[in-house]
Amino acid sequence: MTEYKHHGATMTHLDGDSMTPLRPGVREVMAESLLSLANPDARYASARHYAESLESSRAEVAKMIGAEPSEIFFTSCASEANTWAILGADLGNTASFAKLVGGKTNHISAINAMAERARRDHLPFELLRIKSQGPIEMMSQENSPRTLASFTWADAEVGIISPVRTIGESIRNSGGVFHIDFVTAQKTERIKIRELPIDMMTISSASMGGPPGISALYVRKGIRIKPLIFGGSQENGRRGGLIPVFLAEGWKKAIQHWNEHVDDEREKIDSLTRDLFTWFKNTFPQGVIPAHDEPRIPGIINMLVPGIDGQAAVSKLDAKNIQTGTGSSCSSQSLKVSHVLRALEISALLGQGSVVVSLSWNTEPSDIRRFQEVFPSVVEELTALSPKNLGHARRRA
């Protein structure tokens, strides 16, 4: 069972989108690295050793996606990488972007960055609904001249897979730049970036069992990008600031474990996802799984239960030591329906009943069984408290 202690209680963690548990050995590698803490840009021997460790970690990140180390730039988080790609992408002195295009189910950091660039550069800006066959508006070259496009490979709340190759080829043929947020998909997907029409890509340590606090932006050779954070020579002059080498080494260790086990993990996660989907439909015939007939990555199930409040359900599950989510992780404090569900045209009333189970590399069948044992009683309790049922009870009284 995927459990850990929190304030003395044993928790079942089914909120892998919010935070993925550390893989074996990651904590130990970071602790050892901190014993010889140094600035990798300094001149003394321990600093040179730290710089070598940093470059070794960079090479491991590059190898994971089939890139070159010189194309990997470390950032503090995926939101920074998304923002940098969108605000910093540049076509040079001879041309400028004609418009911006993104996905309605993008991470909110990418949506906000595109809105800011549209305002800053006075560019038209459009968000499109992703479908399996690709956005119709982007299927022809004429509709996307010199476009800066940013899409998510798979969104973190429903898991719908974007037609990456179709969009990328359209953007490349028009002389534009194509950025992908790979964070959610990278948990289970192996890729070779050279075989895809991708110019920039956001990848994350925390999403795959590495430490939070470090991510990276892949920038294909030949793509221009202006700094978002100014400094000295760090990251080849493109991103200023001290890189936390101990976090990079922790990420390297996580990648090594991921590389050895991800194929088996994907098979297990896929099986658990299908089993949970079937159970939910049989247990709650009135329930809805958004976009259930579209291509999706395994490991994410957004369950919409009419008549309940998702936030209340998460709280009651938490009281029973089960951690789940509702909506995207960055809007978990909001009682509003998430922008992802709105993009999928889910009504506010139905969307309010969202409970998201997202699996991690170490999720086991026992975790799912525990959720299945507890969730029906939570739904029953919350349904009884709904305004409709309370009104009915008062009339009977």
Image: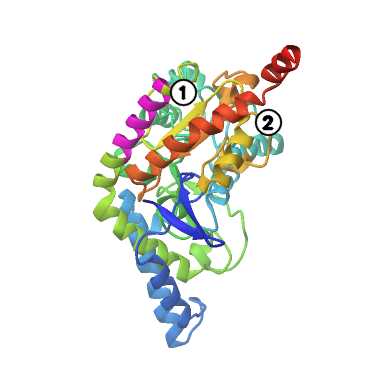
Closest to the observer: 397 or 337?
Answer: 397
Closest to the observer: 329 or 371?
Answer: 371
Classify the position of the C terminus by image quarter: top right
Residue that badge 1 annotates: 289
**Residue at 44 percent of width and 42 percent of height:** 184
The single residue placed furthest to the front in the displayed view is 397
Q: Amino acid at mark 2?
A: Lys
Task: Count the labels in the image.
Answer: 2
Q: Is residue 107 visible?
A: yes
Give the class, few, some or many, for how many residues have Cα within 10 Å of label 2's Cα (few <14, many ≥20).
Answer: few
* Residue 161 falls inside the magenta stretch: no
* Residue 273 falls inside the magenta stretch: yes
Measuring from the top left, give residue 11's x and y in whole percent. 48, 52
Measuring from the top left, give residue 370's x and y in whole percent. 42, 42
Residue that badge 2 annotates: 336
Q: Main secondary structure of the magenta part?
A: helix
Q: Amino acid at mark 1?
A: Ile
Q: Magenta stretch?
A: 269-282
**Residue at 62 percent of width and 58 percent of height:** 229
**Residue at 61 percent of width and 65 percent of height:** 231
